[in-house]
Amino acid sequence: MKDLVGAVGNLNFGSLVSEDDFKQCFAHDFMYGDTTRNWPSKTLLIYRLGEDGPFECEENERGADHAEIVLLKKIRNKIENRQTRTLVTIYISYSPCSKCSEILGGFIGKNKKRCKLKIYFSNFYLILRISNVQLIGKRHMEGLHNLRQKGAEIQPVIGEEMWKMFLKANRVPENDQGRWLVVAASQNRQVREKEDKKIFDLLFPETDNETDDDISVRYICFVIFTLIMYLLYAHIN
């Protein structure tokens, strides 16, 4: 009976995030600052409690809670009732906004002995506009910084190996993963991921001993960098 239960648990019942949602929300090739295309309003995430449990899927509620808050409401009691520290692994289509970072940070601070949070995101959450150019808002950058200070691990999804990790978590059969990886490896997406890496390294250096003034200076550098990238992209296209 135990073997039968294990076999059933290992069966694949399809991906959590559909292939269309993967293309439209996770692995799209939109460039920051490009206002000619509509960025997805839907945020999707898959998550797992512990290191061996199954992944599950959540998404934002239109006009209501962001996906991170939907998740937190679902797992709060499970985490707070545990006696051992639980790793919560999240793959999400947007990095947390400032408010979600604050709430997640508060939850981690309250449950340091019960919870460790690891977040992989595929796109920076954008909100600030300068003229027609869309940028990540300073308060969202500060939110991510503070969330890291609380102990959360945050990392953009960049490169084939990280996408393979996502696809495995998303229950995509190995025989089908090649088709999904083609989307994530498109030329424009690779350009975007190089930008993500530069932005992440710019916003979050190796040391976390930064003051508010340091963050402000880095934000100004980030704005200048993103504007230059946008102008180059607009010129090429």
Image (cartoon, helix red, strand yellow):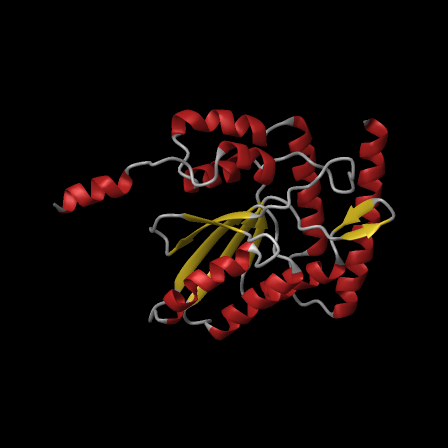
User: What's the residue at 52%, 37% (across, down)?
Assistant: 163
Residue 10 sits above or below residue 207 on the image: above
User: In this rendering, would 186 be left or right of 237?
Assistant: left
- Residue drawn 39% across and 71% down? 80
The C terminus lies in quadrant? top right
Percent of width and height locating residue 185: 59, 29
Q: Position of residue 107 (x, y in %)?
A: 51, 69
Residue closer to the observer: 101 or 37: 37
Where is residue 177 drawn, in percent x and y?
45, 29
Using the image, determine if residue 37 lies above or below residue 217: above
Measured along the vertical axis of the image, is residue 47 above or below residue 167?
below
**Residue displayed at 59% across by 40% down:** 25
Q: Nearer the viewer, residue 45 or 155?
A: 45
Residue 144, image quadrant = bottom right
Q: Please identify the residue farthest to the front as the structure is shown.
A: 63
Using the rendered image of the protein, determine whether residue 207 is visible from the camera's viewpoint. Answer: no
* Residue 134 sits above or below residue 64 on the image: above
Q: Which quarter of the rendered picture does the N terminus lie within?
A: top left
